Image (spheres, coloured by chain):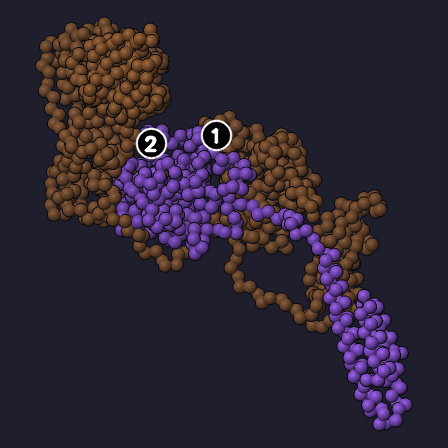
Chain colours: A purple, B brown
Amino acid sequence: MTDDLATLAAATARELAEARDLRTLEEVRVAVLGKSGRLTALLKALGGLPPEARRARGAAVNALKEQLTAAIEARRAALEEAALAARLGAERVDVTLPARPSALGLIHPISRTIEEIAAIFGAMGFALAEGPDIESDWHNFGALNIPAHHPARADHDTFYLPASAPGQPPRVLRTHTSPVQVRTMLAAPPPIRVIAMGRTYRADHDATHSPMFHQCEGLALDRALTLGHLKGCLIDFLRAYFALPTLPVRFRASYFPFTEPSMEVDIGWDRRSGEIGQGGDWLEILGSGMVHPKVLANAGIDPREWQGFAFGMGIERITMLKHGINDLRPFFESDPRWLRHYGFSPLAPALLHERV
Amino acid sequence: MKFSLSWLRDHLETAAPLARLTATLSAIGLEVEGVADPGAALAPFRIAQVIAAEPHPDADRLRACRVDAGAGVVSVVCGAPNARAGMKAVFAPPGSVIPATGMVLKTGKIRGVESAGMLLSAREMGLGEDHSGIVELPESAPVGESYARWAGLDDPVIEIAVTPNRGDALAVRGIARDLAAAGLGTLKPFTPAPVPAAFASPRHWRIAWPEACPYVLGRSFRGLCNRPSPDWLARRLRAIGLRPINALVDITNFFTFDLGRPLHVFDANKLTGASLVLRRGAGERLSALNGREYVLGPEDCVIADDRAALSLAGIMGGAETGCDAATTEVFLECAIFDPVRIAQTGRRLQIHSDARARFERGVDPALLPEAIAAASRMVLELCGGEASEVVAAGAEPAWRRSASLRFSRLEQLGGLALPPDEAVARLTRLGFALEARDLDAARFAVPSWRNDIAAGQKLDLAPGMEAARARAVAEGAARIEPEVELIEEVLRLGGLDAIPAVSLPNAPPVPAPSFSPAATRAARAARALAARGLLECVSFSFLAHEQAGFFGPIPESLRLQNPIAADLDQLRPTPLAALVQAAARAEARGLLERGFFEIGPGFTAAGERPIAAALRAGASPRHWAEPARAWDAFDAKADALALLAALGIAPESLTVTAEAPGHYHPGRSGALRQGPKTVLATFGELHPRLCAAFELSPPVAACEVFLDAIPEPRRRRRAAPDLPALQPLRRDFAFLLDAEIPAEAVLRAARGAERALIAGVTLFDLYGGEKLPPGKKSLAIEVTLQPRAQALTDAEIEAVSARVIAAVVQATGANLR
């Protein structure tokens, strides 16, 4: 390399090193490689040289051009990198600042339990049946083998509404979901497998009773269903609901006007800790039995042809047991703090394949 | 029903321990509600003799005693004034717990004298209030023996819940019979020898109302001495919570529980005339034994003498003819009453007596002569005197019935394959007498005390059932019911745990959906609203009549006749009412989160309808990046639209009108309609007057979606998607128009200007400030043009823009800004 080329290379290298920003860098590039740049001038001067000198000089100048072009681009990349780094540095935010608010609401524990019950009994072939909260005396009592003088009526603490017409018996707020059994049997012939869930009402208000609560009722009618099936169905349900495959379940003889034989069902628990499934104590959890022949007959079904079982349980009660909720009253008080504590995400509905 | 273990053993020969007895009771349907063992707390206490009782050297009121409790003589310091040498007392050794105080005794020194135990007062043992001194036992009390056992206090008391069908189990004997039938021992025979008549009864019965009282026995006694009951009887009654009164009254109470056979004794010297009559009440007043006064109506059965009504038959006696210490002559009553009338009178007069509980379930109609015999014997034993002949009126009602059991039904209905012999044996032990038997079936005579079996009560058939069906089902019920009742008896005695559990058959492996469409709608609505940040509530269906009136009509037909509280008397017109109350409570508590929803019934005269109500009170949360903003009508509208979208309702299918019910702010509320008639939802800010009444700070945004008005989404195959290859273009337009003109009119006009090309119109600015002429507003819209076959030329774009402007101007009288 001749001296003038070496001088140009050295000068350019110095100028590049001194270029602190992209604008200065561009000035350096134009001064060397632009139309009137120093290297461009050298290239233009090649034409005036004799051919043999031109070849050697041309190769040298072109080599310098490539060298300088590469140096300028390298410097540009470095400066761009630095500029980006500076910008990013300036754009820094405090990532500990709170995110934008987008609260998710929650589903009430009662709704959640209703979904779980429907999912489990649905898998056993039960469909949901519905009925009104305001019932006739016949649907709520008479059809279910609870005549007016029956002692069981006294246990029910019924709320009464004025009769729909003079001379008619007063209407009632249903005291249980059992009238839905009657409506189902009247609506279509057996076989039947339904569950009914909803609001029920009794004139009773203290720490363990609420004037409104929720029940789940089940009815299965067929030609050959037995008490053994009732036991199997309830054991299958309780073990799935509590997610305890070995949950102890006990059956005790009892009495309900609308079933015969009747039985109450206990599950194993620990009285002191409240833990379900162990501890050696028993906790009454639902009532059940074979549908009473009179109830079938009252609804127009011949008990010689059809038989089956029915059961009923308190939705609040099994919700409290499953989730360790001690007090019944807050269920209906809509305290947002309680709802936040016990509510369920709407994004995780009860799905059997995700585990209820 | 309470009874003590020793009382049970009067009727049951058994070696079974208490735990097995109680477990069996629960298993066979006599659910044990509690077992109290008063002796448990007294177990460590022994009978002791005070050998010496010297004054304490350093304390005037204390004595230093030497006490022998059977395990050597110990030193005890005692403060009781009656402590003296030679007496028998109750000794608590060190380590035992004093029931009254819970204190654990330790050996120690009291003012320098060792005290290794304590001599107890009645109060310290929890046996009464007497604390004047230590308990003094008779000389015969054996030193070293357990005090509780010696005093008969180690007798556990069992309480069971008796179901309404089991009147026979309201008797110790009935319970013993069930336990014996369940294999826990032998029922002892009960054959009271008749007491011979010593004189002719000066009183007799007359039944004027045989439907209420079909049969009554009576007997006169004279020469009685009505002392306090002996210890054994007083202790028994006290153990089950009854106060001993005097021997005659206590005897009737004893048989109420022992045999389930209520009896009554009238003080004969307080009766007028020779006959007692069972008749309807005639409006007279009766002072009953519970200290209350009752008016006796024509539906109440009373027992009267020539002068007045004396008692509420089968429910409660009257105070005037009751027995006291001066009683020397009595007339004993032993009757049967109609259970239904007893229940009705008891309920009407709100009397819960032991007699009512038994008569309304039905007492044993065949037991009257034996009960009279047993009671007579006890009267003579405890009170002396002599008994007359037995006088009667009416006749023993027909109670003999049969019930048949096909053995195969034990498995076909009960799910348990049980040998026929075992089934027959169990029923026989319960008192069912085998009348006939072949290979397949057996017929039994129902015992007199089981009025719940084969009783043949009436059906209550569905109104309007056709006659042939009614006949068929009645025949079916009559055939099946007694058999099912026998099956129940057989199964319960063996315990239902013996029946193998079988999972339900015939369910398809992939079940059909269990939710009805309505339930699915409700569940999806809940998820949609919860996903928007709202908390689901479940509230009472009723509230105060006046408060409910803020939310719609409140007909008397939806007002409870017997509300549990005055502020819970009216069925709510909408669940929104409950949310308003919830928001007010949350505000009063100073809580900021006040966004709620509820899906539940609203009640109107026309019926119940499912309503999803949502409410937002207060403001969005304060945040450094987004200022807090009071919730307004458009938040409520968004909630309603989101819910509807979740249920498959496209917003384009809805029209919005500025009409909403009176509980909304009249200028800030609207309705979402589908077609001219159907209102799917209402939304808006709540009326400030309503907010003031509920002490809720406005504004409050709310919406109600009527789930029953939402059409079932049709199952349709989706069309192929519209995915044009060309880029859409967007053009903005601003219009100046009268402030009253709804924005919807502008949007609708722009959308319709060129349907083939305009893919969407959005409103992105609303301005109504001072820079505009009065009464005017400015709306700015963005129109999206979607070319399809080829890109649009400038001229085509101009043409579409002109059509948009023209359409809006024509529809609304607006000017382009």
Of A338 and B483, nearer the camera is A338
For the N terminus of chain B, the quadrant is top left
Residue A182: give x, y in percent of width and height: 37, 42
Of B307 and B531, nearer the camera is B531
Where is B53 relative to A141, above or below?
above
Where is B736 relative to B294, above or below?
below
Which residue is pictured at 83% across the width and 54% down the height?
A: B817
Residue A194 visible in the snapshot: no
Q: Dividing the picture into quarters, in which one does residue B241 lie?
A: top left
Of A203 and B107, nearer the camera is B107
Report the disc number at residue A152.
2
At label 1, which amino acid type do we have?
Leu
Which chain is disc 1 placed on? B
Report the disc number at residue B560.
1
SS type, badge 2: helix
Residue A80 visible in the snapshot: yes
At label 2, which amino acid type do we have?
Ala
Residue B810: give x, y in percent of width and height: 78, 55
Q: Residues within 10 Å of mark 2 (few under 14, many from 20)?
A: some
